[in-house]
Amino acid sequence: MKGAHSRAIQATLRDTDVFGHVNNAVYVSWFEEVRTSYVCSRRGIKTTAEVDFILASTTIHFRSPVYMLETIDMRCAPVRIGDSSWDLAYEGRAREGGRLVVEGVSTQVQYDYPARKKAPIPAAWRALLTADLENG
């Protein structure tokens, strides 16, 4: 995933299930962690009051189990930009050996919270997404 935003995440005991591997529900949180890091770093967001989008959907493809204390390099990058929504693709690889553990896509919708309705992607954010899409 060339040009993607990356964040290292270490699987914890809390993340694991009775089978000893990371539970499927945890990956949604990992997607959120790398997505939040990406958006906040690119846009300079410092508070939740500045967040102006909602998560509309997430698709996850589990590729290989992750076990406690494994470090996973999670990456995300834009793959589609619409009028009021944008998609990010995700990839998670085990730091040791580079094993693919998870892939997915999420759709975010720009949102006007006071009006409780979708909104157009702001021009400055669209420019950053476009630059990242073209460099990916």
Image (tube, rainbow, N blue to C red):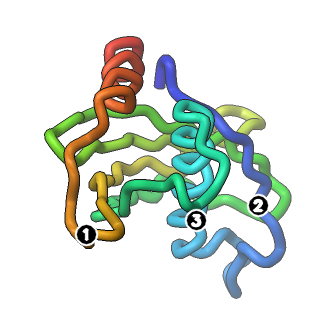
Which of discs 1 and 2 lies nearer the camera? The answer is 1
Image point (68%, 70%), residue name: 21
Q: Which mark is residue 11?
A: 2
At label 2, the amino acid type is Ala
Image point (85%, 58%), residue name: 69
Which of 3/93 is in front? 3
Question: Residue 124 occupies which quadrant of the picture?
Answer: top left
In the rendered structure, the answer to whether residue 75 lies left or right of residue 9 reads left
Which of discs 3 and 1 lies nearer the camera? The answer is 1
Alpha carbon separation for disc pair 1 and 2: 39 Å
Q: Which mark is residue 29?
A: 3
At label 1, the amino acid type is Ala
**In the image, residue 120 above or below residue 69:** above
Residue at image mark 1: 115
Work out whether mark 1 precedes mark 2 in sequence or the reverse, and give the earlier one.
Answer: 2
**In the image, residue 63 above or below residue 91:** below
Which residue is situated farthest in the left direction here? 83
Secondary structure of the residue carrying numbered label 1: loop
Secondary structure of the residue carrying numbered label 2: loop
Location of residue 42 in the rendering, given as x and y in whole percent from the top left corner: 55, 31
Alpha carbon separation for disc pair 3 and 2: 12 Å
Circle 1 residues within 10 Å: few <14, some 14–19, many ≥20 = few
Residue 107 visible in rendering: no
Which residue is situated farthest in the bottom direction here? 18
At label 3, the amino acid type is Ser
**In the image, residue 78 above or below residue 119:** above
Residues at marks 3 and 2 touching, judged by CB atoms closer than 8 Å = no
Image point (52%, 41%), residue name: 39
Location of residue 78 in the rendering, given as x and y in whole percent from the top left corner: 36, 33
